[in-house]
Amino acid sequence: MSAAAQVDAQLLPELASVYWRPRMTAERLRRRERLWTFTTLAHVVPFVVVAIVMVLLSPLALPVSLAALAHAWLIPELYARRGATVTRELRPGPDGPERVSLGLLGDLVDHDARDLHARTGLVPEPGQLGTWLVGEAGALLVAGRRVSCWCVRATDPEGARLPSGDRVAHLLLALRSDEEGFATVANLAFSGARWRVRRRLPKRQRAALDAVA
Amino acid sequence: MSRLIRMDGSGHTTLAEWTAEDVASVDAAAAAFREELEQGSIAMVTRGPGHAEHVRELPLDEPLVIMRRPIAGG
């Protein structure tokens, strides 16, 4: 196999369906993260300034100031909530297929990852960009105090819903074969502070975030 | 004995099993493999902890080849 063919073999085939997207390198990811930080600040700072100015102009404007502060808090929370939904658990399939799919997933990961998946529904996977927590319909990328939320899922075969273990296994295999390609195909739903995403995760999934932090 | 499986609504389905010495089983596995590729599946083999690779031809020496559906951003 030629060198070019070898490189091609390592690329995620699904990249062809998002050919217009630049490949998500570590540098490009940092830029996207900074953009998210800037967006958050752009939402928060004006409301905080308005809140301060209003109450300085007139103490009677305190309710307006409080409303502005509420907006400053709420808007990033809504973004984080949208991000946290990428790890939502989908409706499970019949018991038999669920068991079979979890058996296959268990063969793909080590004992610790199996245990964490059993407790939280998320599979940890170390990568070059950070540590991933892979769920049924998306993944969290944990890097330091930041979490990026990626919406991505397996396309169901015609007329058949994949059981939960297979959904995770699909994403895990794709991630393992081409991490940057995986991040290119997936949609970045949110990137921000770990604490902000953690608050919005279902309780049982917070342990997964704590485990890889 | 190597296995070719497809992740599907049943958990997974074994499409073929083969040994390198059994030419008939290899041919049947290769045919099943090609058919899956034609239907849009992607073939994966694991390469140790944390590594996987997609393959375009049936790797006869791999113990397990997994067919998966494409992924897409949600």
Image (cartoon, rainbow, N blue to C red):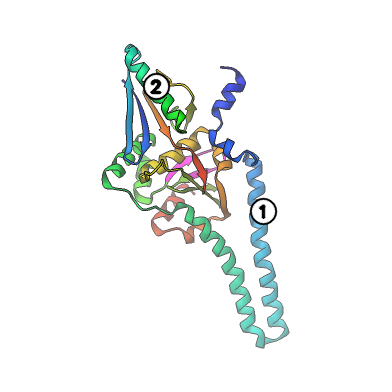
| Quarter of the image that includes the N terminus of chain A | top right
- Whether residue A58 is visible, yes or no, is yes
Residue A35's label in the rendered image is 1
Which of the 4 quarters of the picture holds residue A97?
A: top left
Question: What amino acid does circle 1 point to?
Answer: Leu
Which of the 4 quarters of the picture holds residue A108?
A: top left
The chain under label 2 reads B
In the image, farthest residue toward the left: A96
Measured as percent of width and height from the top left, residue A98 is found at: 31, 44
The chain under label 1 reads A
Question: What amino acid does circle 2 point to?
Answer: Ala
Measured as percent of width and height from the top left, residue A140 is found at: 50, 49
* Label 2 SS: helix
Q: Is residue A104 left or right of residue A147?
A: left
The answer to whether residue A179 is magenta is: no
In the image, farthest residue toward the bottom: A60
The magenta stretch is A123-132
The answer to whether residue A127 is magenta is: yes
Q: Residues within 10 Å of mark 2 (few under 14, many from 20)?
A: some
Residue pictured at 60% horizontal, 40% vertical: A18
- Whether residue B44 is visible, yes or no, is no
Quickly name the residue at label 2. Answer: B31
Q: How many marks?
A: 2
Question: Is B18 located above or below residue A105 in the figure?
Answer: above
